[in-house]
Image: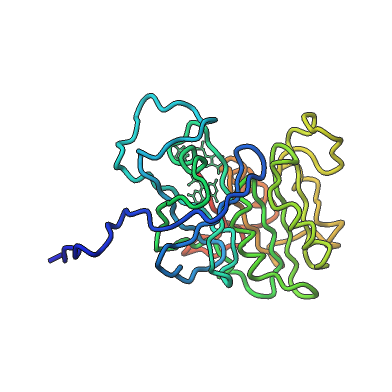
Amino acid sequence: MTESPSPADPPKTALNAIVAQRIEESPGLAVVRVVPDGWTLPEFKPGQFAVLGLPGAARRCIVSDLEEDDVPAPDKLIKRAYSIASSSVAREYLEFYIVLVPSGELTPRLFALEPGERVWLSPKISGVFTLNEVPPDKHVVFIGTGTGLAPYMSMLRTHLVCGSGPRFGVLHGARHSWDLGYRGELMTLQRLCNNFTYIPTISRASEEAAPWGGASGYIQDLWRSDPLRSRWGFRPSPQDTHMFLCGNPSMIEDMVEMLAEDGFREHKPRQPGEVHVERYW
Ligand SMILES: Cc1cc2nc3c(=O)[nH]c(=O)nc-3n(C[C@H](O)[C@H](O)[C@H](O)COP(=O)(O)OP(=O)(O)OC[C@H]3O[C@@H](n4cnc5c(N)ncnc54)[C@H](O)[C@@H]3O)c2cc1C
């Protein structure tokens, strides 16, 4: 028999968290910090995701598309998964890195929230896209497009130890330089840690406001150019390196194929491999 909630229990869909801060990285791209209201965040592993939710009645930001068909019911809680970008050792808030999908159901509502407003945050944190299956002596390459950088920020903020030992590399792809979130933090880490490499690439260099001196093209093009050999002195191989892929599913598909040519296998529960994958849609 299921117990009926006592009148004092809030409903499971109550907006149980508060937006503490929203940092606009560029139009339609934000770092959002959420604090649970009156409850403690559970422990989690860097790379895992939480779920955010808002009711259909929540207002949409003005730059989103009008919702004409399939308008969600006002009391329906719209929920979506978001990788946690903050460290698992500092659990004052959860940080998320979110892009606005103008035609989407949830993100236009999330982007209308001001600091102090309420949101639903799943009390449970899930996911297997973590460093758990990576032997401690292996190097790690994090490859991501857009907000696919989020889980890597949590892993680096928690696990990166500067100095000798395994190397960490981040290859991040975005359309423009202003869409390369966390660039300042990653450039600083690279300056401080000789075992950390950060290589961004942009796919629309011709639209830059000022000349762009970095890599241009897609992540797949960057990988073909063997960018880590000049920094690490060797090309990563399945014997020494684990690869992480996160974000756009077609980037992931291409990269899995390209990495297979070098002998990397996708990690699956019953078939251990060196390529770990998180698809956002
Ligand atoms: C495990 C997991 C972790 C995720 N973590 C993040 C995260 O850290 N940050 C984040 O912004 N999103 C993340 N997502 C995607 C997120 O759950 C939503 O799908 C996204 O915010 C769109 O929601 P929506 O209701 O506005 O759009 P919907 O109405 O659900 O429309 C979905 C469509 O939006 C597009 N889309 C979805 N996600 C993205 C994206 N990140 N970039 C560009 N286009 C997208 C796709 O075309 C998709 O078909 C994650 C998804 C999964 C499964």
Left or right of 205 on screen, residue 269: left
The percent position of residue 14, horizontal first and vertical second, equals: 33, 54
At x 56%, y 61%, the residue is 47
Q: Give the number of callouts.
A: 0
The percent position of residue 1, horizontal first and vertical second, equals: 12, 66
**Farthest-out residue, front:** 116
Quadrant of residue 135 in the image?
bottom right
At x 80%, y 68%, the residue is 193
Left or right of 180 on screen, residue 211: right
Closest to the observer, 214 or 117: 117
Q: How is the image coloured?
A: rainbow
Quadrant of residue 243 in the image?
bottom right
**Farthest-out residue, left:** 1
At x 50%, y 40%, the residue is 112
The percent position of residue 63, horizontal first and vertical second, equals: 54, 30
Relative to 45, say whether 245 is above or below: above
Closest to the observer, 75 or 219: 75
At x 73%, y 36%, the residue is 203
The percent position of residue 260, horizontal first and vertical second, equals: 64, 52
Closest to the observer, 200 or 143: 200
